[in-house]
Image (spheres, rainbow, N blue to C red):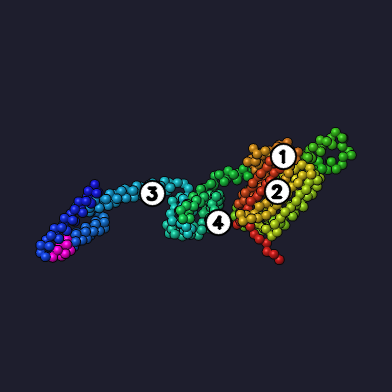
Amino acid sequence: MRRAVLARELKSIALGSSICLGLGYIAGHALLGLCAALAWFLFRQLKELSRLRHWLLATEQAVPESDGAWDDVFRDIYLLRRDERRARDSLLSIIDRARSSVSALDEAVALIDNQGNLEWWNPAAETLLGFRPEDRGQPVINLVRAPSFIRYFKQNTYDEGLKVASQRHAGRQFQFEITQFGDNDRLMIVYDITRLHNLEQMRKDFVANVSHELRTPLTVLSGYLETLLDQPEGIEPRWLRALGQMSQQATRMNNLVNDLLLLSRLENQPEDREPSTVSVPKLLKQIHQDALALAAPKQQTVTLECEPGLCLLGIENDLRSAFSNLVTNAVKYTPNAGIIAVRWWSDSKGAYFSVSDNGLGIDEIHLSRLTERFYRADAARSTATGGTGLGLAIVKHVLMQHKATLDIHSEIGRGSRFTCSFMPSHIERELES
């Protein structure tokens, strides 16, 4: 069809040129006749171009009538504009439905541009976060001023959400989830997790209160048992064994209560605590000395390899609890004359703390659950060593607070290796004196 129109247009041009050329030849000016034909053809094209321009600028106007190839041009442009208008209307309809759906959500949703400024938000964001129409284009960190949120937003890695206490609504807890898309644009969703937080807090308070209440009677019981065992002369031999077992179990219960209280303290600490520079080499030297004393009766070897000046930005007491738990566990579960290696080093990807041993090892089926509370890969062996089943749960909780991870590698009969990995952003270097 298009070829036929083009051929007809070319025939028309050739015929007009021939006629004008013939008339000019008869008049003795053949070249002038040809120029007149070309001028007429150029005038016609400019006229059609002018009609096309006015039609394209007009908002509502029927397709102009034309002949030849220009008719095809007008028709094709009309079809393109019609399809574009339909696609635009469909897209606008989808956007309107999406906005209506997002506006109906109870969660706050906000779009943030690549400069960190607010672009759009739903009504829930006005209720939960207090956003107002005049806040459009403002930096989001100027509107949500919690220090933990500001650090979270600036880090540009949002693998995990952030729990923050509401600054506008007393007693309410929010969880921020941010997803990056496009040219570093961000979608922020804020959930009201007050009910879940309160339920979790009730559980934590119950464990903490029960542990605290158990501490006093256990202390009294342990004290009397220790007094009796210090003066065995007046006690019948058959009771000495019973008192010894009672003292052993009381000590085990004391260890369990202490671990529960420590875990409760870690869970109830505010997440926006300001970290400080922790001299890990100095900390590990203290832990190493304690481990040597604990390993001496079993004739074990405990080595320490430490990168000088490599420090961490974190909470010292919490890190001490985590590192000490890993080293103590290695000593407890490694047989006599075993070897425990403690390392602290760094590379371009971060800093690492590892504890390796050549003990009995752990079956692979247990590795994914080792950090669960009270989970034991070998209940009999844990009971014999006085383990509470909370050590690795404490380690995991401390590492989560420091945005670190725990990797466990173990083989039956060849030993285990526990490695804590810290991000480069948490590394500090000790200045040389």
Q: Earlier in the sequence, mark 1 or mark 2?
A: 2
What's the mark number on residue 413? 1
Q: Which of marks 1 and 4 is nearer the N terminus?
A: 4
Where on the picture, by quarter, is residue 385?
Answer: top right
Crowding near the residue tagged with mark 4, few <14, some 14–19, many ≥20 C-alpha atoms within 10 Å: few
Question: Can you name the residue that lies furthest to the left here?
Answer: 27
Q: Mark 3 points at which residue?
A: 95
What's the mark number on residue 355? 2
Q: Name the residue under label 4.
A: 155
The residues colored magenta run 29-37
Q: Which of marks 1 and 3 is nearer the N terminus?
A: 3
Crowding near the residue tagged with mark 1, few <14, some 14–19, many ≥20 C-alpha atoms within 10 Å: few
Residue 76 seen from this side: yes
- Label 1 to label 2, Cα distance in Å? 17 Å
- Label 1 to label 3, Cα distance in Å? 61 Å
Crowding near the residue tagged with mark 3, few <14, some 14–19, many ≥20 C-alpha atoms within 10 Å: few
Residue located 79% across and 42% down the image: 336
Tell me which amino acid carries mark 1: Gly
Tell me which amino acid carries mark 4: Gln
Are dots 1 and 2 in contact, CB under 8 Å? no
- Label 1 to label 4, Cα distance in Å? 42 Å
Depth order, front residue of 100/8: 8
